[in-house]
Image (cartoon, rainbow, N blue to C red):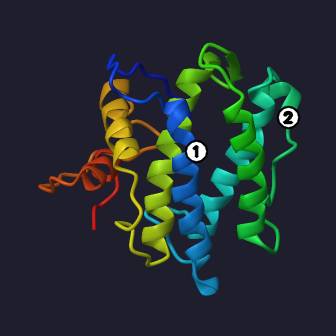
Amino acid sequence: MATTGTLPTDESETPAREQLQRAFNRFSELVHRVPAGAWDDASPCEGWSVRDVLAHMTSEHLWAPRLLVGETTDQVGDDYDGDVLGDDPVAAWDSAATGSREAWANAEDATTVHLSFGDTPAGEYAEQMLLDLTVHAWDIGTGAGLDVTEGVVPEAVLHVLRYARASGMVGRAPFGPEVSTASEDPQQQLVALLGRTPA
């Protein structure tokens, strides 16, 4: 993601970094339920299959442990270019997620992370990671024909919805224009806000 934003202060809300582990659980649970024949099915991300979405997420979480210890994007270079899923997409995701989980468990919000668009506090990087885990879980589940209402983490959805509204990312790449919805469900509002057509 190439965007930054600031979440309005709400001392009662759990910081994004502390929500990541539950978001990992939710995302991984959906990945493990993808039918073997569904990886090439179209996802709600235009031009991306279910496998493409998982490849994006797997690459993102291969990067995370190295960025969280201070490496730059130049130092990581092209280490994770190409096919990061191989013959076993689920195992590839599990491996990347394990390393990322451990790195995030040891991270501090104030740590500076060297991202492609500039130095960023780890707390802000966590906001972006939580958004991707939450929204792309819906993308993978929807593309694979799974029940995306099962196992939703309401706190994460509401947090990401507030963050997306406050950050100025709505309608900007890599997200499509906001889609109108009359739904009062926060998950449906979130995906519509970020250019997806709600179920």
Secondary element type, mark 2: loop
Instruction: Find residue 31 and report its horizontal and vertical position in percent.
Output: 59, 67
Secondary element type, mark 1: helix
- Specify the quadrant of the image occupied by residue 44: bottom left
**Viewer-side residue, 132 vs 149:** 149
Q: Residues within 10 Å of mark 1 (few under 14, many from 20)?
A: some
Residue 171 seen in the figure: no
Quadrant location, the N terminus: top right
Give, as a three-letter code, the residue at label 1.
Gln
Q: Residue at x 41, y 19 (%)?
A: 6
Give, as a three-letter code, the residue at label 2.
Gly
- In front: label 2 or label 1: 1
- Residue 77 disc label: 2
* Residue that extends furthest to the front in the rendered view of this protein: 12
CB-based contact (under 8 Å), mark 2 and mark 1: no
Mark sitting earlier along the chain (2/1): 1
- Residue 84 disc label: none
Position of 12 compared to 29: left or right?
A: left
Position of 48 compared to 179: left or right?
A: right
Q: Residue at x 82, y 47 (%)?
A: 80
Quadrant location, the C terminus: bottom left
* Residue that extends furthest to the bottom in the rendered view of this protein: 37
**Viewer-side residue, 108 vs 47:** 108
